[in-house]
């Protein structure tokens, strides 16, 4: 049986740079699988269905909820987002590592159901920088911008629940820190029990 892959959850406030850092990480480790969420929000310019998200109607989202096909889900800024459970489970069972780039409400649900997950909270280098990043995105209406700033403060307050804090001052550095976390997590004793057992038996024989 293939060794179970690692479930890595990268979370943090809007503007911390989760998307950019996760993309940089995927470029560095092409064997990592990014979970593509379902969302009810409209695609932004340049976003592709099945790549950035699966863009679904409210009815389709509710149907997936009814069928319990979400590992976690949340309502973020008035739109629903959820991680397809079956895809994540299949990829992990095949021994591949999966990254979830999700908000804090979802990450906390995953903490409760997946004790083996690795939870990384991405912080901006400062509050001022976070505000600038959200404003510079320019994709938000004024109302949505204000909601994101208020939510960011609440999300940062949840960061002590995570296993690791990574400051995204430079994308390459944040990427390398998360890469180092993944490498170290794979070396944990509890993730290598079978290897220990095999070698212990070989040594005895
Ligand atoms: P955006 O609309 O800017 O792509 O994402 C808004 C927020 O939803 C971001 O914080 C993003 O990480 C989060 N998000 C994206 N997919 C999921 C998901 O499947 N579950 C949860 N809980 N949050 C998600």
Image (tube, rainbow, N blue to C red):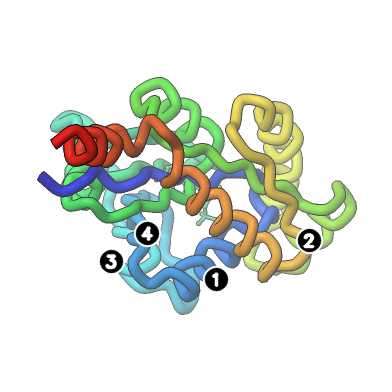
- Mark earlier in primary sequence (3, 4): 4
**Is label 3 in a helix, a strand or a loop?**
loop
| Sequence-wise first label, 3 or 2 | 3
Alpha-carbon span between mark 3 and mark 2: 30 Å
**Residue placed at 47% from the left, 38% from the top?**
118
Q: Position of residue 39 (x, y in %)?
A: 36, 50
- Residue, disc 2: 169
The answer for how far apart the CA atoms under marks 4 and 2 are is 22 Å
> For residue 50, which numbered disc appears in the image?
3
Q: How far from the left and from the top, in percent, is residue 10? A: 53, 47
Please give left or right for residue 185 compared with residue 199 in the image.
right
Q: Which residue is mark 4?
A: 34
Q: How would you rate the neighbour count of disc 2 (Cα within 10 Å): few for under 14, some for 14-19, many for 20 or more?
A: some
Front tag of 1 and 3: 1
Q: Tell me what residue is drawn at x 82 percent, y 53 percent.
A: 125
Distance Cα–Cα, label 3 vs label 4: 11 Å
Name the secondary structure under disc 4: strand
Q: What is the quadrant of residue 197 in the picture?
A: top left
| First reached walking from the N terminus: tag 4 or tag 1 | 1
């Amino acid at each position: 049986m293939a060794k179970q892959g690692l479930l890595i959850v990268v979370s943090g406030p809007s503007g911390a740079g989760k998307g950019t850092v996760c993309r940089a990480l995927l470029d560095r480790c092409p064997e990592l699988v990014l979970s593509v969420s379902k969302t009810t929000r409209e695609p932004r310019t340049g976003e592709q269905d099945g790549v950035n998200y699966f863009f679904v109607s409210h009815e389709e989202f509710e149907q997936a909820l009814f069928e319990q096909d979400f590992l976690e889900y949340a309502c973020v800024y008035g739109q629903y987002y959820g991680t397809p459970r079956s895809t994540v489970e299949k990829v992990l069972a095949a021994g591949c590592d999966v990254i979830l780039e999700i908000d804090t409400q979802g990450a906390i649900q995953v903490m409760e159901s997946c004790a083996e997950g690795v939870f990384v909270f991405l912080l901006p280098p400062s509050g001022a920088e976070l505000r600038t990043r959200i404003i510079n995105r320019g994709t938000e209406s004024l109302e949505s911008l204000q909601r994101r700033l208020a939510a960011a403060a609440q999300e940062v307050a949840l960061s002590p629940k995570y296993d690791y804090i990574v400051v995204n001052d430079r994308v390459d550095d944040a990427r390398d820190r998360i890469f180092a976390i993944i490498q170290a997590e794979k070396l944990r004793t509890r993730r290598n029990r079978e290897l220990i057992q095999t070698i212990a038996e070989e040594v005895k024989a």
